[in-house]
């Protein structure tokens, strides 16, 4: 009998540890909990919201824990239609906190279910609010007021879930990709049209400048030729006057000088052959006869 005492003591200690582990639980910092008895909340008036060691009845009571910190909801982007019939893609995020664990348990039971409900609430509220504003308002400082209105509507609807919506933000509000591409193509076509127009204007201006320059060139050449003809005429006139004065002073010398110039020009080419009479006036200064001089 004495030999079975240690074994019984060990079994009793094990049973005691099991009972203690089943009747004691710890709520950590950042958590809140509900004690459930056969699936119903054991003490609806006193949910556990602080950290510490707590007791429950073993085997008939369970503990469900909820996060007491801020939680995020990050739904996928949704396409919404604004008051001016513009379609935009809106990407939002929401931050909330569980403030009534009992109501939360009764409404959605789990955090994932609560996030799914909040995604639906945020989407519906965003559609209602953004359906009454235009695209310039969404892209202007009015955006802050729009987000505040969405948050108010979401928070009002989320109270039935036992949560408090702390913030709702529009992270991105863009035109759909196909709309953006159409706008980019239209802008590109517009820029190309403006560039073609600018090139045409430049070509027209260049042609005007070239025509003006050609006209000025023609005028300048004509004036230069006119002036040169005038100067040439004046020079010939002056030369004739000089020749006339020289001829009047010594006609015989002038005749001899002009003949020398004629010889020089006509006999400059050694391959030139002349057939003239010896008594020709052209060779009168080559003759020895005084009458030919």
Image (tube, helix red, strand yellow):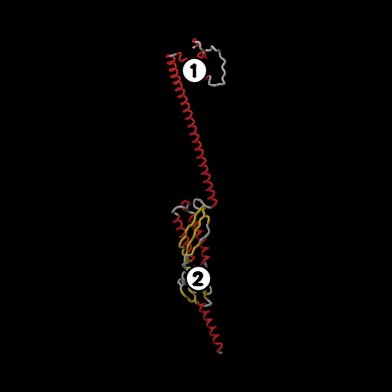
Towards the viewer: 95 or 205: 205
Residue drawn at 54 percent across, 86 percent down: 6
Q: Please report contact status of discs 1 and 2: CB closer than 8 Å, yes or no.
A: no
Residues at marks 1 and 2, CA–CA distance in whole angstroms: 136 Å
- The answer to whether 204 is drawn above or below residue 5 in the figure is above
Residue 282 percent coordinates (x, y):
52, 14
| Total numbered labels | 2
Which numbered circle lies on residue 65? 2
Q: Please name the residue that numbered disc 1 is placed on.
A: 260
Towards the viewer: 26 or 231: 231
Secondary structure under the numbered disc 2 in the rendered image: strand
Residue drawn at 48 percent across, 30 percent down: 217
Towards the viewer: 263 or 120: 263
Towards the viewer: 98 or 53: 53
Crowding around mark 1 (Cα neighbors within 10 Å: few <14, some 14 to 19, many 20+) is few
**Mark positioned earlier in the residue sequence (1 or 2):** 2
């Amino acid at each position: 009998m004495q030999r079975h005492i240690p074994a019984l003591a060990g079994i009793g200690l094990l049973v005691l540890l099991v009972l203690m582990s089943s009747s004691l639980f710890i709520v950590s910092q950042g958590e809140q909990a509900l004690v459930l008895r056969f699936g119903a909340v054991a003490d609806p008036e006193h949910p556990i919201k602080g950290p510490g060691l707590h007791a429950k009845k073993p085997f008939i009571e369970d503990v469900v824990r909820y996060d007491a910190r801020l939680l995020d909801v990050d739904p996928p982007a949704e396409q919404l239609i604004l008051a001016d019939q513009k379609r935009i893609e809106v990407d939002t995020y929401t931050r909330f906190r569980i403030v009534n664990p009992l109501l939360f348990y009764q409404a959605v039971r789990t955090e994932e279910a609560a996030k799914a409900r909040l995604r639906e609430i945020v989407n519906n509220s965003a559609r209602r609010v953004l359906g009454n504003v235009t695209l310039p308002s969404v892209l202007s400082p009015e955006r802050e007021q729009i987000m505040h209105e969405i948050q108010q509507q979401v928070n009002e609807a989320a109270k039935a879930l036992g949560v408090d919506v702390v913030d709702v933000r529009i992270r991105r509000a863009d035109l759909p990709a196909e709309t953006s591409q159409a706008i980019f193509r239209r802008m590109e076509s517009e820029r190309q049209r403006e560039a073609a127009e600018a090139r045409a204007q430049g070509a027209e201006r260049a042609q005007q400048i070239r025509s003006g320059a050609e006209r000025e060139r023609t005028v300048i050449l004509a004036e230069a030729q006119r002036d040169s003809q005038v100067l040439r005429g004046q020079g010939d006139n002056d030369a004739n006057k000089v020749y006339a004065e020289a001829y009047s002073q010594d006609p015989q010398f002038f005749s001899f000088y002009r003949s020398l110039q004629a010889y020089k020009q006509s006999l400059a080419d050694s391959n030139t052959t002349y057939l003239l009479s010896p008594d020709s006036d052209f060779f009168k200064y080559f003759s020895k006869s005084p009458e030919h001089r």
